[in-house]
Amino acid sequence: MTINKFLKWNLSVKLLVILISTLLFGHWLPQNLQSILYAISLTLKEILLFVLPVIIFSYLFSSLLTLQSKKAIVFMLFLFGAVCISNYISTLIAYGVGSIELIQLSSIIINNTEYTDQLVPLWNFELPKWISNNQALCFGFSLGLLLSFFQISWIHKFSDYAKIISSLFIEKYFIPVLPLFSLGFFVKMQHEGILNKIIQSFLPIMVIVMLTCLLYLAILYALAAKFDFKQWLKYIKNALPAALTGFSTMSSLAAMPITLKAAEKNTQGSNFVRVIIPTTVNIHMIGDSIIIPFLTLSILVTFGYKFPWFETYNYFAVSFLLTKFSAAGIPGGTILVMLPVIEAHLNFSGEMSALITTLCILFDPVVTMMNVLGNNVFVIILCKIFMKIKFLVVKNVANSKIIDVTQLLWFKKMWRKKRFIQ
């Protein structure tokens, strides 16, 4: 097999090959080579942490700058609020399931102090910490929201260019070297004798987290269908083609055209669909919001750390859901921007970060499928809420005799025909 053929492989496949190769042959590598690989991984991580504030700012600033009117801003803020609530509930589910003894029982506790033969990197490369990710997040949010009131062409151009450059860095430069980024940390864990135990401990954990996601989504679809079994099956049947597309492409964005069709079927052609889906496709991610925190907690326990108190986890959850607004919609994009958040709030080491990055990318097809299913049920529930609010507003205005009677009759006629939503 040539190197060129290997480079053309799917990212998940490349990471899996590197993981298995390290398990089988990692201990045969000379220690100097192991130190070099570990140093390369630390260098790549340092570069990523240095650039991430720019990426976070550009994505968040660009998304908020698209708002063009006061009505649009109110609607979008309501929509973003709903996304935050949904993502936050998902992170709480991850914590609730994780707090059960099942994780502790299914994990092999690894105490790093037992291993005295620590691998030392051949060099240490450090870049200055010029701005924190939280500062970039707050600056991007406030500036984007403020400038959305003014339609200044050069600011929009600057925003577009900044987002394009950030996307290019992740997609064209960092994603291709991710296998090398993970390799050094895998070699370190293999050198210290913990890689085999980690792999064994995460087989039952991945089963638990997948079942948790499926159960939660099934409950959400049941709520949307008002616990009507036939309607529940219809919703899921319509959403499955989009979910399978997300599974095969590992991209919610690539599955968006099919997601739109599924959502239109499930909402009887509601006009809200074409606003909600494109806006939330890369920020409302139920799969990520359950699986990444769940794996984070599992890795903490696996490496011998105590399960965090809710107060500590809550700080992490809030930072997590805010940072999700700056995530790139590409394989591995979410976990890459989340690494500083995880390290800051839960004290992840380099090898822990590499492990969760690899696991998230390996299971990215399943995670994306969960995200797409979540986006479908999210739009169904939101359309029902929006139409209920609209109906109540029209009714109240009509009672105050401010609205034209013909407009009210037209709305009632459309409502009875279920023109907006079932």
Image (tube, grey):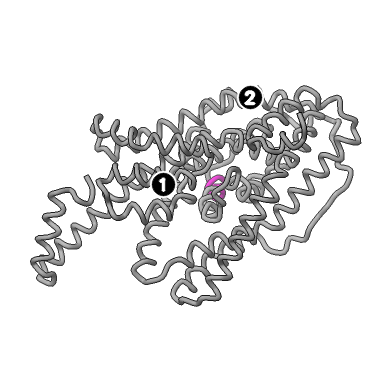
Quarter occupied by residue 70: bottom left
With 10 as the anchor, is 82 left or right in this view? left
Return the x and y of residue 54 as percentages of the image width and height.
Answer: 64, 61
- Residue 315 shown in magenta: yes
Residue for point 59% across, 37% down:
360
Q: Check the picture and name the quadrant holding the C terminus.
A: top left
How far apart, in angstroms, are the residues tagged by discs 1 and 2? 38 Å
Main SS class of the magenta portion in the image: helix
Region rendered in magenta: 311-316
Q: Is residue 337 above or below residue 146?
A: above
Q: Secondary structure at mark 1?
A: helix
- Does residue 237 appear left or right of residue 137 in this picture? left
For disc 1, the marked residue is 257
Secondary-structure class at tag 2: helix
- Which residue: 83% across, 52% down? 125
Residue 255 appears left or right of 218: right
Measured as percent of width and height from the top left, residue 103 is found at 56, 28
Residue at 90% from the left image edge and 30% from the top image edge: 30
Q: Would residue 95 be seen by someone viewing this image from the given angle?
A: no
Q: Is residue 319 above or below residue 240?
A: below
Picture quarter with the N terminus:
top right
- Crowding around mark 1 (Cα neighbors within 10 Å: few <14, some 14 to 19, many 20+) is some
Q: Residues within 10 Å of mark 2 (few under 14, many from 20)?
A: many
Question: What amino acid does circle 2 point to?
Answer: Ser
**Is 58 displayed left or right of 197 in the figure?**
left
| Magenta-drawn stretch contains 24 | no
The answer to whether residue 231 shows anywhere in this view is: yes
Q: Earlier in the sequence, mark 1 or mark 2?
A: 2
Q: Which residue is mark 2?
A: 201
